Image: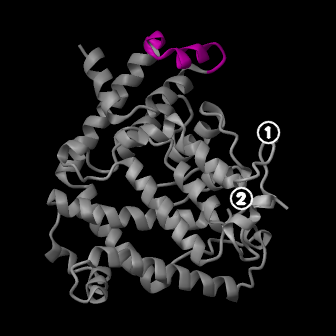
Amino acid sequence: MNSSDNIIGNLASYAIQNSSSKRRINEEEDPNRSPFQVDCHRILFSNSFSRLANKTQVLRPEHGDHYKNRLLHTLYVAENSVDIAGRLKLNKELSRAIALAHDLGHTPYGHKGEEALNEIMEKYKSRFEHNEQSLWIVKKIENLNLSDEVLDGLDKHRTEYDNPRSQNDKMPSLEAQVVNVADEISYLYHDIDDGIRAGAFSFEELNNLKIWRDAIDAAKGTGHARSQIIKLMVADLVYNTTNILTSENIQTPDDVYNYSGSLVKFSDDMQNKVDELRNFLFEKFYNSKLVMEYNQKGMEIIQFLFAYYYNRPEAMSSEYSKRLTSEEKYIVVKDYIAGMTDRYALEQFIKYNK
């Protein structure tokens, strides 16, 4: 038994045990930390994680001091993942590690930046998907030698925005499935806050949403309706998932892997409310003039930079340009641009677009 199994307390039989963890390259066991705690530390201290602080979530910091960036989003996902995993008696550190790494592959300029890089990759009969890039980063670029269970969770991360082509057709662990939903819970919550702050919609408009009215009722006049939204979603998710695990007689991780679909999900009633909220945010916030103008400019910057570096690869930093002797140029340029922060991409655009 891994000596760190006792660190995280009693786990359910269908949870991933520390003692079952494996890595592509064997390492000596850390006597004081679980393998997934080791993974968390490696991710947290990676260069790719540091750059998340200057990658856009929806709006750039110059619009105001309190808009969420990609790093804050990641930390919210990690915190919600740990909370949910703990309530379900799952391996919290595994969920945390997957959550911390799930957006490492995000481009500058949010999902429109990803769209721009994907359009470019299609010209080379390839594609760009930020979760696939996250997996590529931890395995190839940062070479973190993470646990197989974390890699599998990244390989199969699924939300409205995430569609990686998995390397196998088995379901991921429950810990990974928790991160999938925690990702959605997190961005729905903080994008309400950012949308209000940006003036994209009003509190009166939110009153048309069922989940908002439920949150107001739960807040009981305290004025903390937004925080109640997370509480309502998490409570429903844990209750519904627990019932599913019982009714489907899920006993082991293999039962989870071989199940035909996700086991961690909202009740139908809550899912309808979540869908209503998501559609509202798309209409009022994500497709607002302020956001769309910034996204369009970001796409143009990425398209320009790719063409520039492809034709002048020596302009890339040495750690990337030296890869050209053994790798396809379009892959190296893709990696270089995907790793940029919004600020650095803009600086390079201004520098070279003369």
The residue lying toward the viewer, choosing from 4 and 352, is 4
Please tell me which residue is depicted at 64% across the width and 12% down the height of the picture. 325
Residue 112 visible to the viewer: no
Give the mark nearer the N terminus: 2 vs 1: 1
Report helix, strand or loop for mark 1.
loop
Amino acid type for the residue under numbered disc 1: Ile
Please tell me how many numbered marks the rendered image carries. Answer: 2
Please tell me which residue is depicted at 59% across the width and 55% down the height of the picture. 98
Disc number placed over residue 169 in the picture, else none: 2
Range drawn in magenta: 312-327
Please identify, in this view, whether the residue under mark 2 or under mark 1 is nearer the observer.
1
Residue 293 part of the magenta-drawn span: no
Q: Position of residue 331 (x, y in %)?
A: 56, 27
Please say if 207 is above or below 3: below
Please say if 343 is above or below 276: above
Q: Say left or right for 9 vs 220.
A: right
Please say if 148 is above or below 276: above
Residue 319 part of the magenta-drawn span: yes
Which of the 4 quarters of the picture holds residue 265?
bottom right
Alpha carbon distance from label 2 to label 1:
24 Å
Residue beneath disc 1: 25
